[in-house]
Image: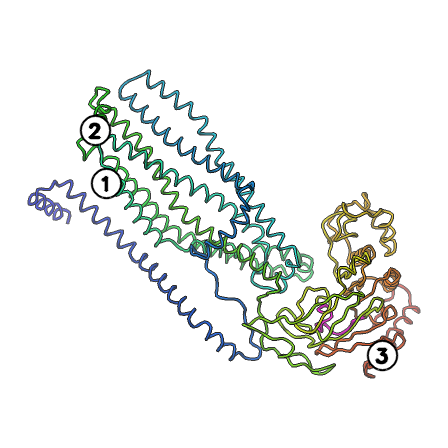
Amino acid sequence: MSSVFSKLIDKTSNRYGIRQERLTHGIAGVVTVLYFLKIGYPFLAARIRQRQRTANNGTKAERGDSNQRGKNEKNLPPDRVHKNGGKEKIAGLDRVFVKQLIALLKIMVPGWRSREAGLLACATLTLLARTFLSVYVATLEGQLVKRIVLKDIHGFVHMLARWFAIALPATFVNSAIRYLEGRLALSFRERLVEHAYKMYLSQQTYYRVTALDTRLGGAEQRLTDDLSELASSVAHLYSSLTKPLLDCALVGIALLSFSSKMGAKKVSGPLLASVVIAVTGQVLRLASPRFGQLVAEEATRRGRLREAHARISAHAEEIAFYGGHQTEHRYLTTAYKSLVTHLRRVLTLKLWYVMLEQFLMKYVWSGTGLFVIALPILYTSGIGSQKDEGSINADGDGGVSERTRYLTTSKNLLLSGADAVERLMLSYKELVALAGYATRVNEMFEVFKDAALCKYQRNVVTNGVSRVTNGTGSHSEKKTIEFKDGSPIIKGIVRESADGSISLLDVPIVTPNCEIIVPGLTLTIRPGDHLLITGPNGCGKSSLFRIISGLWPVYGGTLIRPSESYSVRSGRPALFYIPQKPYMTVGCLRDQIIYPAESGTEDCSDEELLKLLDEVDLKGLVDREPNGLNALGDWDSTLSGGEKQRLAITRLFYHAPQYALLDECTSAVSVEAEGVMYETAKKRGITLLTITHRLSSLAKYHKLLLRFDGEGGWTFGPLDVDNMTVLNKTPEETEVNEMKGNHYQMLHGLCETHTEDTYVGIS
């Protein structure tokens, strides 16, 4: 086969007068090009078809979205859950990204007099100086080679000294570029973090985006890693775009100047280089994967893995008691494998893209560059103007040294220019990755803004059935809560009371997923009206506290709460919530007592704090700590459940609010200590709103009773301490309580007649 091919080449060469070497190279080049077309064409065609299909599907979806949404909502079954929110956002280089980036840049650079503007100006000057130094160094290297060809020792030493002299400012400029880029990234991150924390920690946004909205899933990943990556990407992208643009401009001008001195035309070479760069850039753009979408998806999966680890750390004791390590291991493995699968897919996509990118940028561009700088020497007469001809032959060697200098300088400048264009091409990937981070951060800010305006999106029950089967009043769901475009409408009114009372007028208790627990609740509580709240699990007891505190929206009726002016006049907070499992903050023991106040702003003596601890029988905690009230520790894991509850009651006594919202806050405390705490709270003028299942021990400290039946009904009225009943309590419930009381009396009698080592219980 090879002999046949050789004979064919010989005949063709003899017939058309073409050299065999040139003909062989031409055939090899054509075969290589056809081979790469065969490999790359299916990939490029598939990418183009995919883009066209995505665009067509998006257009069809936009046209039929409104009509189809209306049909789907009409045909939803009664228990159908409707997911709020629009179509999935795909990060890309479009108008949306430009708007997002401009909005984020206004946060990162608030004004031209800001610190960030000064850093940007310094970075720009440094990049400009680096570009001029690159051109100057390339010129010096050309002069060095010329002196070597001429064997000019004195000139060589002189140029070498200049080359070393310029090295010091050049290295300083290079280091300054990296330093300023790092400073820019830190400064941008500070601005973003300050803006994000201000939105996140105001108007209970931190609670609303977690409990009432499901768009973010978890804001921790976006508040930490995404903000950092966004700031670093913007700072690096500024350097990687500004310097290549400056390099391209100055290097192009320098190359045109040198080529014209050698007698070359000013159009053919730059035109060819521009065409090659434009064509390769278009090919890379068509072949480029969706790096922005891939980066956003990677950040999302990393966030899920972090949440899985955080969940284990937060609930380590419960998992250990249940022996649930195998289940948690499965969750962790699933999250990790999901991330690894995505990373493998990204690496596979990058493999073929980087291969194509390197072929075009390294070999195609290098060959084009060599051809461009060879044009003035190979395809010109070497004669320009009389002045140029004289300068070329001034050394008396026929222009050899000058051409050598030209080739060396042009090659160095060409390498700098090619490197600049390559960095511009690579910046496309960085820009698309930046689009992914910008989309996630901008979405976070949008959710924060919506949460502050009480606009939520989550899975909601749009056609659920109310729990009401009996009880006070019967409200249809249509009147209780209404929807618009799948989102509930908040129609409730929140007012401030001048006398410090709390009133609910036909206020429904609705969960964040719009499940109606109680269709309408009406009651009034004045200072001194201690209220006892009871009922089965999931009946709305804790939900009532969330509505009174303003954590949950009021979907109907009127809520009247103490005003801030009333709290200022009385010198005490209006509401203070104590849960069953109190929150232990980071800090010393004093910080646990005065939370949420800070030690540096509070004027409270140690004697007062010790007195408060003594009232809950917790003074021994200070005695056992070497540093007393200043002792630091992990209080959430160090203290027992009863100690944490008593410490939370100490916190209540310290702040002495108008109303105390107590949610099973003494379940781990003895009955005797519980009584002392409630009596002390009443003496301090605190109105108690207590959720409990221990009616017998807490009834004597309250005046009113609110009972939920778990089916949407409720009863509210004065509490009869002697009979443990409200005025409309049923005889059956009274009989059940009497039977329980007789059983407990029998238990205490048996305990008195037996020794301490004997176990006595009631089955």
- Helix, strand or loop at label 3? It is helix
**Which residue is identified by label 3?**
739
x and y, in percent, of residue 496 in the image: 74, 65
Disc 3 versus disc 1: distance between alpha carbons?
105 Å
Q: Nearer the viewer, mark 3 or mark 1?
A: 1
Does the CB distance between marks 2 and 3 fall below 8 Å?
no
**Label 2 is placed on what type of residue?**
Ser
Disc 2 versus disc 3: distance between alpha carbons?
120 Å
Q: Which residues are magenta?
A: 532-543
Q: In this view of the protein, which residue sits in the foreground, 584 or 348?
A: 584
Q: Residue at the spot x=77%, y=47% of the render?
A: 601
Is 27 placed above or below 709 here? above
Label 1 environment density (alpha carbons within 10 Å; few <14, some 14–19, many ≥20): few
- Helix, strand or loop at label 2? It is loop
**Which residue is identified by label 1?**
268
Q: Residue at the spot x=93%, y=69% of the render?
A: 753
**Which residue is identified by label 2?**
385
Describe residue 669's horizontal placement relative to residue 491 as left or right: right
Magenta includes 176? no
Which of pointers 3 and 1 lies earlier in the amino acid sequence? Answer: 1
